[in-house]
Amino acid sequence: MATVPVYCICRLPYDVTQFMIECDACKDWFHGSCVGVDEDDAPDIDIYHCPNCEKTHGKSTLKKKKNWTKHDTGQSTDIKAVQNGSQVFIKELRSRTFPSADDVVVKLSGSQLTMDYLEENGFNEPILAQKKDGLGMSMPAPTFYISDVENYVGPDVGVDVVDVTKQTDSKMKLKEFVDYYYSTNRKKVLNVINLEFSDTRMNSIVESPQIVRRLSWVENYWPDDALLGKPKVTKYCLICVKDSYTDFHIECGGASVWYHILKGEKIFFLIKPTSANLSLYERWRSSSNHSEMFFADQVDKCYKCTLKQGQTLFIPSGWINAILTPVDCLAFSGHFVHNLSVEMQMRAYEIEKRLKVKTLTPFPNFETACWYVGRHLLERFKGLHKANKQPAPYLIHGAKIINGAFRAWTKKQALLEHEDELPENMKPSQLIKDLAKEIRLSEVFWIYFYFQKQITQLNSKFHQIVLQLETPGVKCKGLFEMLCSSPFIYLISLYDYYFLINRGQCARNINHIENMKRWVNVRVRASC
């Protein structure tokens, strides 16, 4: 029976999951973890000598680079551009001043952050909760350490590790990263930002905020028995050492995100998702040297928000943000897409597709989630209409955006690109048709409701005018009756007009009403 070849100083067989490097002297192969060579450093090595060969052949040598210190390893340099994440960059970033996020961040207690609050006020600005009380979330005690993460998740679990200075990532076992974290001589700044642990034992001791679970499309509308499993985006563990930095980005799928700091703190640099800022972001991100340009310099305002231990931050869809970790930090986070920000989510998703962004925290099968949501909204609208009730305007608006996307994705020339995300047993053309019908019914109701409200306001105004006349007289009473009837007839005619033509012309009809009100006011003043 043939023997299995063994390698390295550990004399173990080849393992496809472990990085190995060949000694240029003895030609044997060695595990990077056994000889202290990181995978992302290997391309910089010109000649490698293993520990045994170093004694006779000398130490390994590095390739000569004209621009070696572009990434700033602490050596002196004549470099012109500074790499985002380098030591020079971090030092400069710490010294700069930014507008306070108090201008844009809403501060609420956990008990105030409810569905009613968000439906009334929207979720367009970041929300900060000083304490986790009332958020309906579960977190480990502050005595929970990085070593505990290793115990709950498993030491041999592979994690993506970011080299902050180079803004590159590589694979490493969690145990190896934990050893690095506790080492007294860290030669690099490494962090872990995408350790999704919902399938591990740690899932039982961490629960996302209740409002997130209520809003989440994945939690509420993705069938448990679907052939395609639910996207694993709800629970991330972030292990970041001092001076870790994540450059400006928009969450994939336009997702909103929550962060809770268990230990340490993080500094968020927040930029509003205005049309101008999103266009600038897309141009910056598509540039080949974007990692040498600080995006905040290109926009009018970038807000600084410091999130401390025990605090929780909710960032809405589309917000462009970067994150600096000033001290060692252990945090938890999660991504969620929802009905309150459908338009922004879709816009961010389109930007993501155009940029072909590769990220460590993707939102897989975003389009599949949209199809499940579309089916849910159809059934919800039908149920409400049957009960003589109406969906909220934000739901109608979201349904229109989603149905528009469905039409675009199922066009003949686009279907090939999108059909893989169609759920099983879904009839897209029928869903599009039925959902459009329910949207029209809801829109007609809200237009009629608006017109009725306008009629009531006009009649009330006319009553006040007549009562204020010193000597009303028969003429004025006749005028009042005429004015009371004319607006009503005019509004009803507008309603009929709206019903017959494109139901999306609500704004034009409202302008007609405003013109009519001005016409009436002129005549009332003239008659008095």
Image (cartoon, helix red, strand yellow):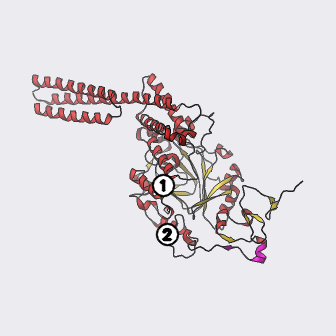
Query: Badge 2: few (under 14), some or many (20 or more) residues near its Cα, within 10 Å?
Result: few
Q: Is residue 509 above or below residue 350?
A: above
Please tell me which residue is depicted at 32% across the width and 34% down the height of the picture: 506
Q: Which residues are magenta?
A: 53-66
Query: Badge 1: few (under 14), some or many (20 or more) residues near its Cα, within 10 Å?
Result: many
Q: What residue does disc 2 label?
A: 81
Q: How far separated are the C-alphas under marks 2 and 1? A: 22 Å
Q: Identity of the amino acid at label 2? A: Ala
Q: Identity of the amino acid at label 1? A: Asn
**Residue 484 on image: x %, y %:** 20, 25
Q: Is residue 22 above or below residue 502?
A: below
Q: What residue does disc 1 label?
A: 321
Disc 2 is placed on an element classified as loop
Residue 424 visible, this orientation: yes
| Residue 170 found in image quarter | bottom right
Please tell me which residue is depicted at 80% across the width and 65% down the height of the picture: 9
